[in-house]
Amino acid sequence: MKFGKPKTATPARRHGGNSCRPRRTAFGGCRLPMTGRRDEMILCFKLSMPSVGSWNGRWSGEGDLYARVINFGRSKAASEKAKAILDKGFFRYGFGDGWCAAIGVKEVSSREATSIRRTSKGFCGYDWMIDSIRFDGKIVAPSDRKEE
């Protein structure tokens, strides 16, 4: 049996001066000093199937969360694009066979984004819809896209 100073689980962190040391808040949390930058715009895209053309009228993924979180960054251009998407807030796409996909968009905090990433079951292969919303402002099928 060894005697002496007990080992800690993690080594102590050293901060480079007082300017970058986290400050305690009144609620017990930590926050970094303000740098004058804008907050990140984080949007959550949530998939649903409101019109289902299956034999029993139900979607097998009905009770699950299908969502994807996108960080739009801090730049002015990215923030304007995110606000334009948020203004519309809801996008629909009809497949032409009785099925219809809907994507709801909302702004979330980083804490909510982490929770959504953990509980989401992906986006069912419809990531192209999110890309279309981001770049075209609406859902355009890959086959309908014009090559540039």
Image (cartoon, rainbow, N blue to C red):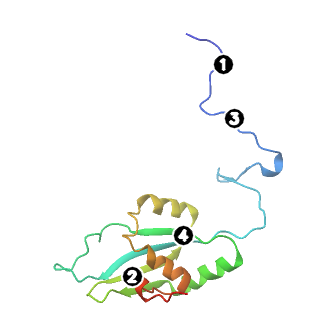
- First along the sequence among labels 1 and 3: 1
Q: What is the CA distance from the residue labelled 1 to the residue labelled 4?
A: 47 Å
Q: Residue 44, position in %: x, y?
A: 50, 71
Q: Secondary structure at mark 3?
A: loop
The residue nearer to you, when weighing 101 against 83, is 101
Residue hosting label 2: 102
Q: Residues within 10 Å of mark 4 (few under 14, many from 20)?
A: some
Residue hosting label 3: 12
Residue at the spot x=62%, y=12% of the render? 3
Pointer 1 with pointer 4, Cβ within 8 A: no
The residue nearer to you, when weighing 120 against 141, is 141
**Residue ranking furthest to the front:** 148
**Residue ranking furthest to the top:** 1
Q: Is residue 122 left or right of residue 28?
A: left
The amino acid at mark 2 is: Ala
Q: What is the CA distance from the residue labelled 1 to the residue labelled 3?
A: 15 Å
- First along the sequence among labels 1 and 4: 1
Residue at the spot x=32%, y=86% of the render? 95
The amino acid at mark 1 is: Lys
Q: What is the CA distance from the residue labelled 4 to the residue labelled 2?
A: 17 Å
Q: Residue 147, position in %: x, y?
A: 51, 87
Q: Quadrant of the N terminus?
A: top right
Q: Secondary structure at mark 1?
A: loop
In the figure, 128 relative to 19: above or below? below
Which numbered circle lies on residue 5?
Answer: 1
Q: Residue 78, position in %: x, y?
A: 65, 77
Residue hosting label 4: 70
**Front of the two marks 2 and 1:** 2
The amino acid at mark 4 is: Ile
